[in-house]
Image (cartoon, rainbow, N blue to C red):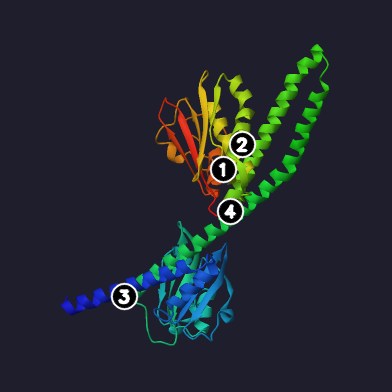
Amino acid sequence: MSDSTTRLDDDTARRRLDYLYEVTARLHEMPLDENARLLMLGRLAVPDIADWCLIDTLSETRLTRVTAVHWDPTRSLSEHTSEHRYDPDAQHGPSVAVRTRKTYVTGDIAARAPSEIGDAIDLELLSLGIKAYLSVPLEIRGVVVGVATFAFAESARRYDRADQDLAEDLGRRAAQAIENTRLYEQGQRALVARDDILAVVSHDLKNPLSVVGMAAGLIKGTLSKPDPKVEAIVPYVEAIERAAREMERLINMLLDAARIDAGLLQVQARDEHLHSIVGEVIESWRPTATGRKVELRDEVTCERSITIDREMIARVLNNLIGNAVKFAPKGGVVRVAATSDERGAQVSVSDNGPGIPAAQIPHLFDRFWQAPGQARKGSGLGLYIARAIVEAHGGTIRADSEPSRGATFTFNLPARSD
């Protein structure tokens, strides 16, 4: 092979690679819309490797035309939109590419004998004046989802091996475009379904749960007389109250997670005294801590006010203190500290429990994450929601731990800059 031939081959390969890069870049710039991306691919194929680019998607036994691009823009897509039956017995035409999962190439179709006419698309191509074409199957994970046909009509060109290789590369990009858009659409449908389910949870479950909680409170209020039978009932009523509160907390966490995922978490911030919020949450957990033989220490020293959403920050504290009380050993200590200065506030919750392995710390704030090999001890949403709330305030949250030496969760809230 001469040097000039080698240079020519190198130039051809370089141009082909540049062309494929351009196609890939242009497709990724397009919105996640299957038809729009396939139309763009057709426009990029014409007239470089075809006079016509036709793309059909396969659904059960039907091939539906989604793209029909000609070098002459006046020959519009709508004129050639069609639907054909996929013919698994065809010996010629795009159906062969679908059946064999291999590129089908044909030369001068006008010169073929009537017995060599293939499927319905083959007949359509003949009516369009197409003289030579190749059809590339579009595969997603081993399943054919369509076929792309590149054809010469007015030009005298014919397809060689290099053209076939390029067309197959374009076919792979077309298949990728279809897969990406379909995965995106599946994800969007899943989000809608999730939101519908959460709406049911919010309304159809939360309302009757509130009735259960109120009814338990009313029953408990009537059980005031010193009577052995009454005293025997009280623990059961209190158990109902606790279960109702826990179920309501879990429902609220699910709804919070849904709002975070949808980007709908809203902070209603105003000037608050952080020490009062921390103190209220500490006192709400004191009975539980006492029952578990855990000392709960209030080491709050901040006096400055800070602009925050009181209810949201209380949720963060409830989660961190609740976890610390849960994991602290019997006779253990949970410390809650808070300081503030002109830059903002810092809050930390520490326990002297078993600690957290270093490999698990990066995953603590992941959605639904649970430590492997442990019994499930919660929804896996608390820390995920805590991080989202802190970050919505412009702050940061982190975890520090050493095995057998407990864990410390710290979050910072910046002062408002006016």
Task: Pick whichever of labels 1 and 3 is earlier in the sequence.
Answer: 3
Task: Pick whichever of labels 2 and 1 is earlier in the sequence.
Answer: 2
What separation in Å lies between label 2 and label 1 (alpha carbons)?
18 Å
Location of residue 76 by image quarter:
bottom right
Left-right relation of 279 to 347: right
Location of residue 206 by image quarter:
top right
Query: Closer to the camera, 184 or 353?
Result: 353
Q: Mark 2 touching mark 1, by CB under 8 A?
A: no
Residue at the outermost top position = 228
Left-right relation of 96 to 321: left
> Which-is-in-front pick, marks 2 and 1?
2
> Which-is-in-front pick, marks 4 and 3?
4
Residue type pointed to by label 2 = Ile
Identify the residue shown where x is 63% and y is 32%: 280
Q: Which residue is mark 4?
A: 263
What separation in Å lies between label 1 and label 3 (alpha carbons)?
51 Å
